[in-house]
Image (tube, rainbow, N blue to C red):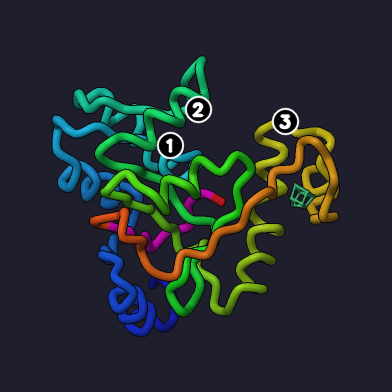
Amino acid sequence: MFCSNYEALESALTKRGFIVHSVKDAEEARQLAFSLIKKDESVGFGGSVTVQNDLDLYNRLSERGNKVYSHWYASDRSRAQDDAGKANWYLASTNALLSDGRLLNIDGTGNRVASMVIGPEKVMLFIGKNKFVDGGLDDGIARIKRETCPPNARRLKLDKLPCGITGHCADCNSAQRMCRVTTIIEYPTRAIKKFHLVLIDEDLGR
Ligand code: SF4
């Protein structure tokens, strides 16, 4: 079960204007993506272990013939981020899904959170059940600092960051600091015509 009070969460998300899908695992989430995204549509990617590693959607959609943009695979990262933000779809995850249905994210560059706010017109976030936080903003931020930042610091080889070294946030002042902007999406903005949330009954990403 995605969370103990799934009906209340689904109702809160729907009232906020999100389109909610519930799937059992990564394979089902991938099939859903393939059914919603047309073959001739372009797809931009935010940095996401869930989407790019667990679901492997960049490679799978590229093999199907979709035009795909991801700064993870591009030599010109800035150009790829720009192109991703202008595609038909934007795929990512969220750092935390709060029990009242708000989406909480912390970003370093800002491209990922910007695209969830100002478009593409169709956004789809893939959310493993480990991203659900049975609580509010403080609990969500604590989750991100505890579960997301330390492994990301190590994955990105940001060797000056206290969280990567000790596993704990020190509210650092490092040039490598990842936590530079925090967003709370309460409702989809008017720029986003369809904001899909795929709730996956499996632990995925960080
Ligand atoms: S503020 Fe610094 S130490 Fe804390 S989680 Fe972010 S990058 Fe890591």
Magenta segment boundaries in residue numbering: 195-205
Callout 2–callout 1 Cβ contact below 8 Å: yes
Classify 10 Å Cα crowding around label 1: few (below 14), some (14-19), many (20 and above): many
Q: Nearer the viewer, residue 166 or 24?
A: 166
Q: Tell me the element at label 2.
A: loop
- Earlier sequence position, callout 2 versus callout 1: 1
CA distance for labels 2 and 1: 9 Å
Q: State the residue position of label 1.
A: 52
Q: Position of residue 44 (x, y in %)?
A: 35, 35
Amino acid marked by disc 2: Trp
Callout 2–callout 3 Cβ contact below 8 Å: no
Q: State the residue position of label 3.
A: 157
CA distance for labels 2 and 3: 14 Å
Q: State the residue position of label 2.
A: 72
Classify 10 Å Cα crowding around label 2: few (below 14), some (14-19), many (20 and above): some
Q: Which corner quadrant holds the N terminus?
A: bottom left
Q: Tell me the element at label 3.
A: loop
Q: Is residue 42 magenta?
A: no
